[in-house]
Amino acid sequence: MNKDAIDRVTQILRHIMEDTSVPRNIRRAAEESKDILSKDDDDATVRASTVISILDEISNDPNIPIHARTLVWNVLSELESIRD
């Protein structure tokens, strides 16, 4: 189940990274988050918690477009299910 959730989250993060209407710092955070999730060294809950803290910070950025903020919120809710 965690693997499926991580795959869905990775796809959403990849979509954010490829969207040129999203500011560069937010695309960079999405890329960093994707890289963290792809590492199998740590437990899935540790990776999810790390990414949640990164994405929570960018979700409050006033420059993030509404559509990207919605995607980030979707990712956060998906990661919360992994962490719990």
Image (cartoon, rainbow, N blue to C red):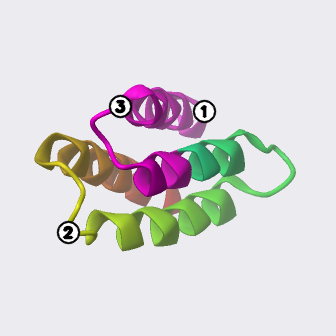
Q: Name which residue lies at 46% across and 26% down.
A: 11
The amino acid at mark 2 is: Pro
Which residue is located at x 79 percent, y 44 percent? Answer: 39
Residue 23, given in percent of the width and then of the height, sits at 35, 49
Instruction: Please give the residue where the numbered disc 2 appears in the rendered image.
Output: 62
Question: In the rendered view, would you say 56 is above or below 47?
Answer: below
Picture disc at residue 40: none
Which structural element holds mark 2?
Answer: loop
Q: Amino acid at mark 3?
A: Thr
Residue 84 seen anywhere in this rendered image of the structure: no
Span shown in magenta? 1-30
Q: Position of residue 84 (x, y in %)?
A: 46, 64
Q: Residues within 10 Å of mark 2 (few under 14, many from 20)?
A: few
Location of mark 3 (residue): 20
Residue 56 at x, y = what percent?
Answer: 37, 69
Residue 9 left/right relative to 21:
right
The CA span between labels 3 and 2 is 17 Å
Inspect the magenta stretch and tell me whether residue 3 lies in it: yes
First in residue order: circle 2 vs circle 1: 1
**Gap between marks 2 and 1 measured at Cα:** 32 Å
Q: What residue did someone put label 1 on?
A: 3
Looking at the image, which is closer to me, 50 or 45? 50
